[in-house]
Image: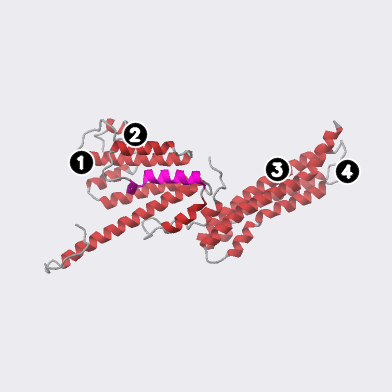
Amino acid sequence: MSDPDAYIALISSLPGSERLFVAKQPPISRLRLDRRLRALTPEDVKVLQVLEHALNWGDYDMDVTDVQAIERCKAALGDIPQPTLQKLFLERMDLRTAVAALRLRKQGGSSPAGTFGMGRWVRHIPANWSDPTFKLESSMPWLKEAHQLLEAEDPLGLERLLLSVSHKQLKRHAARHLFDFEAVAIYVLIWNIFDRWAQSNAQDAATRFEKLAQQAMADVADIDFEGAYA
Amino acid sequence: MNELVLTLGWLGIYAPMALGAASSAIGCAIAGQASIGAMTETEGGYGRFIGVSAFPSTMVIYGIVIMFTLNRDVTPENAGGLFGIGILSGIALMYCGIWQGRACAAAINATKEKPEIFGLSLAPAAIIEGFGVFAFVFALVISAGIS
């Protein structure tokens, strides 16, 4: 348990979260956020780095294997002393494990024999492979919708759902932490969710714009779309 | 033995003042840090933040009044009563001051985003103030029975 009053000034200096999926960008830029986070102690900075490094997909190489990713997450869990942060980290791992299993099954894979995830459902999921929600509907009510979105091949809808579930999990933990380190860490993780959504919107918009431009200019064959996505 | 009893009596007289001062210092520091943080993020209303962060200072005032009320010649007969009332009212004031500071900090943090909830956000701090007043008033009432 961290000092409940450790970061009163820091938390009070951070702008509140906007509404997810409504706000076009995070409530504070990363540059300003990092400047504010200078108030953290070196120990807390390390924990936050470990947490972000393990949870941000951007920090993983494209060719990282399941085993490597899981080892990294297990190592990260050992470096996080705060019970709340451990709990939310494991919740995120449960979510990722369930989604990984859904994707595996969608690709036609059979029940995984080896390591494919992390957390308490690693054995339960292969044992209930044929069930649409791996018989996890009571623990993960969102899994049914995720399954439907995956089957409907709606990646943006799935991304939106997963970010929304992660956001709700973080908000639930945030209610018990006002001014301690956990509150700061949860704020940064929520910031990452906003940032990820803002980025996926930007990418989506760019792709859509490019498609529309290609459509509109279909008759003009000799125009070169410089910098267009492949 | 008498010396120990008399010492406890003096301890009881000064405890409300000392614990009240400590609680006001901690409470004001907690709420003050929140107001400083909020000022870096907002464009105005700084005076309100500072005003709210001074709320827990009332605990030391209550402590001073209780101390003066309890202040009398300490004898082996009244030392136990002075000790009991002084220490317990002091502890009550201390908790009220610290938690009032936290309530004020939360109010400041919420108000910076939604200024319209300023009055309502102070309700928890005001309720805690009420508990502090209870401890204060009944310490005065009970102390009247000590010779």
| Residue beneath disc 3 | B91
Element class at badge 3: helix
Crowdedness of circle 1 by 10 Å Cα count: few (<14), some, many (20+)?
few
Same chain check for tags 3 and 4: yes
Look at the magenta stretch and give its main secondary structure: helix
Instruction: Tell me which corner region of the image, top left, top right, bottom left or bottom right, holds residue B33.
Output: bottom right
Element class at badge 4: loop
Crowdedness of circle 2 by 10 Å Cα count: few (<14), some, many (20+)?
some
CA gap, disc 2 and disc 3? 48 Å
Vertical side of A122 occupied by A153: above or below: below
Crowdedness of circle 4 by 10 Å Cα count: few (<14), some, many (20+)?
few
| Residue beneath disc 4 | B73
| Residue beneath disc 1 | A107
Q: Position of residue A136 (x, y in %)?
A: 33, 37
Out of A157 and A225, give the one closest to the viewer.
A225
Q: Is residue B97 magenta?
A: no
Q: Earlier in the sequence, mark 3 or mark 4?
A: 4
Left or right of B8: which side holds A145? left
Same chain check for tags 1 and 3: no
Report the chain holding disc 3: B
CA gap, disc 3 and disc 4? 23 Å
Report the chain holding disc 1: A
- Identify the magenta region: A41-59
Same chain check for tags 1 and 2: yes
Q: Do tag 4 and tag 1 residues touch (Cβ < 8 Å)?
A: no
| Residue beneath disc 2 | A121
